[in-house]
Image (cartoon, helix red, strand yellow):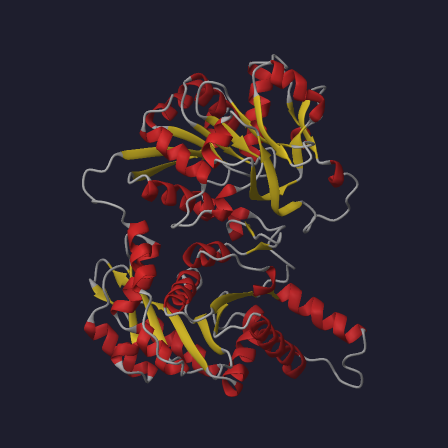
């Protein structure tokens, strides 16, 4: 069967949840037994997301193959319970790099290389080649940014051309705002966005309308009129308790059946067993009187929660698995620095457990170390991820092993750099895609907390780091009581460390990248379970 295409665009503004819509559609189609996968295009000229600022772009998500991609790929994987590949991430940088390389090789001899047709032809060929290679029934193409943006205009044009060649459905994700003073859902912004979409030659087959409450019939009818669509093709996408409720919200409005019909796919019945299992994971028990577990996330990008999107979702998966209600206390690490640090650190007593996630750079580091010390000395369950493990080592070296100036080379040279550059990182001249990236096997030591959590001596987790525990100090740390509970399979690099006699564990990898609603990350599940039980 020839691949069908679903193109998801935003005609009004970015940040409306195109990734959640694309993931929900992929999930729905997979429940019907179709081989459906999402592809994401981002217009920026970065080759990938690896060198981007989390404050501006949000989390950098890492795939099994080491690709550093947009955070929407985390959403794709969590909805579909399926690993994505780097080839499904297209950026303006990749596109232009490939086209220039083709030109240099003489593949356009005698031609003026232009956006149309050379770049748009390249995009269509690449998309179709990927679809054939993966034997896809449906490819869902999410167009990053907003229709009308300069940086994605050529890609939107390529999608218009694709629609003339192959069975393609266009979905416009828009917003229907409601001013509190007026109390009425306003459709004018959507009308204006539709004009922009039509100027690019695209007539949407469905409108998905983001609203705070259910879309009113009056607003639906008006949007349908301006969009040249029947009212049932205008889909309500109001706020729901969990993003994972979106597929069911769309199916209640029969988007599944309408979409399958528009794509001309063979009729199939939905996999009820898989659907019920999905629902059971999301809502494992009664919703009343659940115990509440509060987690203090102490980080340096707290002002943009999307910088920790996978951490937040992993905690959510673990809470669902343990049938508890999750409360996240977002704590800026700099809050624990300066003259009032001692007074402020006591606020962590209001949380059941403490988590320090990954990050780069010196700002806020001392505050994180102070939070880790508080967790250790007060017996609060602690989970450290990547940087959170490295700082766990620094704190232990300073306050238990009495190496007062212990630190990471990333933050300054001292006689006791207990964290140092990976050997393979020395002398690198380029930053992009040069870290230790992607899935790697880890050897877990028997009799440790890590082994009791994973239940296996060999596991695999995804990595994204340049620094490691410095083996020169491995002996002094272990003699001081720090447990190195996991290493690389050759034993050369420390992968996990633990405190004795309490739940305190740090991992150099990023287990949050593999957590799914059906399969929560083991470390997160154990972390929440221990916190719910009252810790050590």
* Left or right side of 115 for 369: left
Residue 340 in view of the camera: no
Q: Residue at left 50%, top 54%?
A: 71
The location of residue 333, given as percent across then percent down, is 48, 31
On-image quarter of the C terminus: top left
* Left or right side of 147 for 100: right
Q: Nearer the viewer, residue 223 or 259?
A: 259
Residue 292 in view of the camera: yes
Q: Quadrant of residue 479?
A: top right
The location of residue 531, given as percent across then percent down, is 35, 29
The location of residue 404, given as percent across then percent down, is 62, 15
Q: Nearer the viewer, residue 410 or 421?
A: 421
Q: Is residue 175 above or below residue 457?
A: below
* Left or right side of 384 for 195: left
Q: Residue at left 80%, top 73%?
A: 104
The location of residue 76, given as percent across then percent down, is 46, 59
């Amino acid at each position: 069967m020839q691949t069908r295409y679903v193109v998801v665009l935003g005609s009004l503004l970015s940040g409306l949840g195109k990734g959640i819509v694309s993931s929900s559609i992929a999930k729905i189609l997979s429940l019907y037994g179709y081989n459906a996968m999402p592809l994401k295009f981002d217009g920026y000229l970065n080759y990938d997301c690896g060198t981007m600022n989390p404050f501006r772009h949000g989390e950098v998500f890492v795939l099994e193959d080491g690709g550093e991609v947009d955070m929407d790929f985390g959403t794709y994987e969590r909805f579909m319970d399926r690993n994505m590949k780097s080839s499904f991430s297209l950026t303006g940088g990749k596109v232009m790099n490939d086209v220039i390389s083709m030109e240099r090789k003489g593949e356009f001899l005698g031609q003026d290389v232009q956006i149309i047709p050379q770049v748009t032809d390249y995009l269509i060929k690449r998309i179709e080649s990927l679809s054939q290679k993966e034997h896809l029934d449906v490819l869902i193409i999410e167009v990053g940014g907003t229709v009308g943006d300069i940086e994605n205009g050529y890609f939107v044009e390529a999608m218009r051309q694709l629609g003339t060649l192959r069975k393609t459905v266009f979905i416009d994700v828009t917003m229907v705002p409601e001013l509190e003073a007026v109390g009425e859902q306003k459709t004018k912004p959507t009308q204006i966005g539709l004009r922009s979409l039509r100027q690019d030659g695209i007539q949407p087959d469905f409108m998905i309308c983001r609203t705070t409450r259910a879309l009113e019939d009056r607003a639906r009818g008006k949007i349908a009129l301006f969009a040249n669509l029947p009212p049932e093709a205008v889909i309500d996408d109001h706020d729901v308790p969990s993003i994972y409720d979106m597929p069911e919200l769309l199916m209640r409005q029969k988007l599944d059946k309408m979409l399958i019909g528009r794509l001309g796919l063979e009729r199939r019945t939905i996999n009820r067993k898989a659907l019920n299992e999905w629902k059971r994971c999301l809502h494992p028990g009664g919703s009343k009187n659940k115990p509440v577990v509060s987690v203090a996330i102490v980080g340096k990008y707290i002002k943009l929660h999307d910088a920790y999107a996978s951490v937040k979702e992993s905690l959510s998966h673990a809470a669902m698995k343990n049938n508890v209600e999750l409360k996240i206390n977002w704590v800026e690490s700099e809050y624990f620095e300066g003259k009032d640090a001692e007074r402020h650190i006591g606020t962590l007593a209001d949380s059941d457990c403490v988590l320090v996630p990954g990050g780069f750079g010196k700002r806020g580091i001392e505050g994180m170390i102070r939070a880790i010390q508080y967790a250790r000395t007060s017996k609060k369950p602690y989970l450290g991820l990547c940087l959170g493990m490295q700082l766990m080592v620094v704190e232990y070296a300073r306050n238990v092993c009495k190496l007062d100036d212990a630190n990471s080379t990333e933050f300054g040279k001292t006689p006791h750099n207990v964290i140092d550059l990976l050997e393979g990182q020395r002398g690198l001249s380029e930053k992009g895609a040069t870290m230790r990236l992607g899935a790697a096997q880890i050897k877990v030591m028997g009799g440790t907390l890590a082994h009791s959590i994973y239940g296996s001596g060999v596991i695999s987790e995804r990595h994204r780091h340049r620094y490691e525990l410095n083996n020169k100090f491995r002996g002094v740390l272990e003699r001081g009581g720090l447990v190195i509970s996991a290493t690389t399979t050759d034993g050369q690099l420390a992968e996990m460390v633990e405190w004795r006699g309490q739940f305190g564990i740090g991992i150099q990898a990023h287990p949050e990248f593999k957590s799914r609603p059906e399969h929560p990350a083991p470390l997160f599940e154990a972390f929440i379970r221990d916190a719910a039980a009252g810790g050590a």
